[in-house]
Amino acid sequence: MLLGALQLAFSLIVVVAMLVTNKVHFQADMLALLPTEDSASGAQWQQSEAAFFNQHQSKVVLSFTGEQHLKAHDQAHQDFTKKGWLSSEKVNPDINEIARFYSQYQGSLLSVANKQSLERGDNFDEQILSKLSESANPFVQASFELDPSLMIGNFIEQSLVNTNGISQQDGRLVKQTPQDEVAILIVDLPEQAKDIVNAQLFATELLNTLNTIQSTYQNSVIKYSGIVFHTSENAQQAAFEMSLFGSLSLIAMIILVWYFFQGIQALSAVLLTLTNAITYGLLALFIVFKEVHLISFVFGITLIGIAIDYCFHYLTDKIEQGDTSLHNNAVRNAILLGFASTAIGYAMFLFTPIGFFAQIATFIIFGLTGAIVAVFTLVPQLANKAINDSRLKTTGQKLASIMASNRKNMLMVVLLSLGLLLAKQVFTPLTFDDNIALLSASSDKLLANEQSHQQLLFGTNHHRLLIRANNNQAALELEEQLNQAIMSTESKAQVSAISNWVPSAKSQQENYQLLSNAENNQTFTQINTLLTQKITFPQFTLLTVEDALKSPIKSLVSPFYYRDSQAVTTLMQVSNIDKAKLAKLISPYANKVMLVDKAAQLSDLMTLARENLLLWLVIAIAIFTVVLWKKFTRRAAINAGAALLATIIISLLLSNVIQGPLNIFNALALVLILALAIDYLIFYQSRALHPMNVIAITLSALSSAFVFGLLVVSKTPAIFSFGLTVVIGLICIYFIAPLTIRGKYE
């Protein structure tokens, strides 16, 4: 007992010390789950993608509509400026500032329409006069004195069209929709808002401010969206469910243990076993891995059910034997065999291509080691205390008698259920859907806001392309090639890219040559007679990305630009074009252009993980069957293998009937079911229908049902799926496991 207490205390102290001294780094970003590319180029793509993602992770989009939308916008702008949450750089700089900057590069910049007119040799007199007649045109007003040819004004107008109709009016970003005018405000939260805890604080402060503004300007409608709100809502929901489900399951477990064991000793044994198991698992994770992903704990909660199972079997056997010296070695051997089989099965996770599976395997294997240590060092002394075992024995005898006398009926029910579910597959085959949205518990309101803002800012069918090149000019030229290909395929498409604001050197030289030829051909002679300021083009000056990043258009360029030590990566945003068409257009540039769809990537990752899980289950069943064959008999191995297959098939098919398409979390539930099933089958082979064996397995099943069964009422689809399949699987294996043996215990 002393040795057991010392090892538990030491482990707890080390774990707490590592947490307090920040030696442990937790990772909650789902993007971190994506497999790391082995090739240097693959790693560079991931680095570039992460850089663009981080730029937008702390941004919040606010939209204002209604009669008082401008007042509400201005109040929000004032409030968030005081908090320091608005960027000092203008999202859309003033047109006059842009025109003054571009005037330095007169002759280098041409709109597509102007360039085509020059190539055709069109007369510019009517075009310029027509533009000049538009006295209210802001582009004419801003650029005429700087460039009487209006080439710069036309270029700016064309570039701003690709902002999906968003313009700047009186210092506000606004967009005119068919329904209403919308004012837009982009909030840039501090870096610490990315943290899970801080995200909730910032989201709460944002919402409180917006609610105050809404109550002041009641004739306005305010919508909000951003990663910080999703993080906050999901964290709050998770905390609520963990608190509720944890409390209820703990109360249920305490009542269960107290009812059957009628003493504090057994309850202490169970809690110490769980504590030791979790401590060992955490210690191993913290030592082996630099970063621990939180989803590993979600997968790792299967440890609870198995650890409790070991404890109940040891307790009931010790109570049955009474004297420690008469303790049945069969139980000890069965626990060790179950541990070995489960550990070998989980070790298979180390060979899958999904990186975080290694964390799951480490947590479970070392956690079970901790459970074994607790059961053999801490539990014996507690089990030797006086415990009233009459209720245990009576209940165990009744259950054993029911199972023995109803063997044929139970077998018929299992076979009938299996047959009906398999027959159903002929008409409605099993389907899977591993959408990343399964992990989200975000509110319908927030999801609707997100979709509304996506449409507002980017239009329909919005896609992102990453372009990687050795230098800026190569990237700009590739952008222009793609832009031309996209517009020739889909004329209504909109493209936002750096090349909209900074044409490539090649294009600028072509533009200047066209204008010089037109000037030499006296194309502007007649219009010059009507203008007080003559149309002339000074010496060629090249506009570069470096120039743009130090200019008033920096805010229009920098979000699309990333440079590392080896290459340049630019971002193109494309709207109003089908994804399949876009994918076909970029296929010739496979090594230079990547279509980014993070949701699809994560969903594909979950599908890969599910496929690996199902393959792992098959391998684990095969390994366990061989172990039983060597340890017991061939018949025992065949029966156990059949029981496992039947349990898995019924669990999956019945879950499919209840919830519809299955997902990775249904497959994950099978891992827990398999681990518990292995223990149940081993103990039935070792102790058959001994009353204390039956009651131990019953208590284990009930405890797992209490812990995981409550998950079926979770609002998070993934957790619901997990809980549903666990409950079905537990019921199945509880009644199927006794069918693998014959006769009563002697």
Image (tube, grey):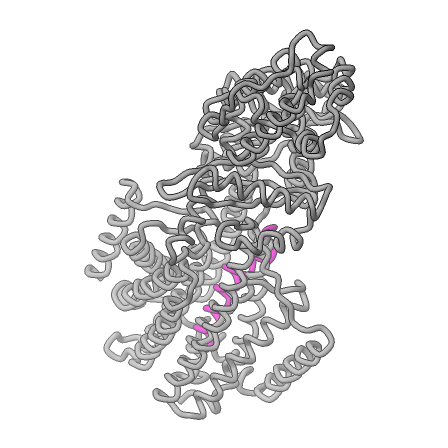
Which residue lies most toward the top here?
532
Query: Could you say where residue 251 lies in the image, as x and y percent from the top left?
Result: 49, 54
Q: Quadrant of residue 347?
A: bottom left
Q: Quadrant of the N terminus?
A: bottom left
Please say whether residue 676 is one of the residues in the magenta stretch. no
Q: Relative to residue 37, is residue 645 drawn left or right?
A: right
Q: Residue at x 24, y 52 (%)?
A: 9
Query: Could you say where residue 280 lies in the image, as x and y percent from the top left?
Result: 30, 58
Which residue lies most toward the front here?
521
Q: Is residue 614 visible?
A: yes
Q: Relative to 293, say whether 474 is above or below.
A: above
Which residue lies most toward the right here?
178
Write the start and end of the magenta stretch as one range.
Answer: 694-716
Majority secondary structure in the magenta region: helix
Q: Residue at x 68, y 19 (%)?
A: 139
Q: Relative to residue 54, is residue 531 drawn left or right?
A: right
Q: Residue at x 78, y 21 (%)?
A: 126
Residue placed most toward the observer, 475 or 301: 475
Please say whether residue 711 is one of the residues in the magenta stretch. yes
Residue placed most toward the observer, 302 or 351: 351
Query: Could you say where residue 155 lies in the image, as x and y percent from the top left?
Result: 64, 26
Residue placed most toward the observer, 325 or 735: 735
Q: Relative to residue 129, is residue 312 drawn left or right?
A: left
Q: Residue at x 62, y 42 (%)?
A: 483
Q: Quadrant of the C terminus?
A: bottom left
Query: Could you say where residue 81 lies in the image, as x and y percent from the top left?
Result: 53, 18
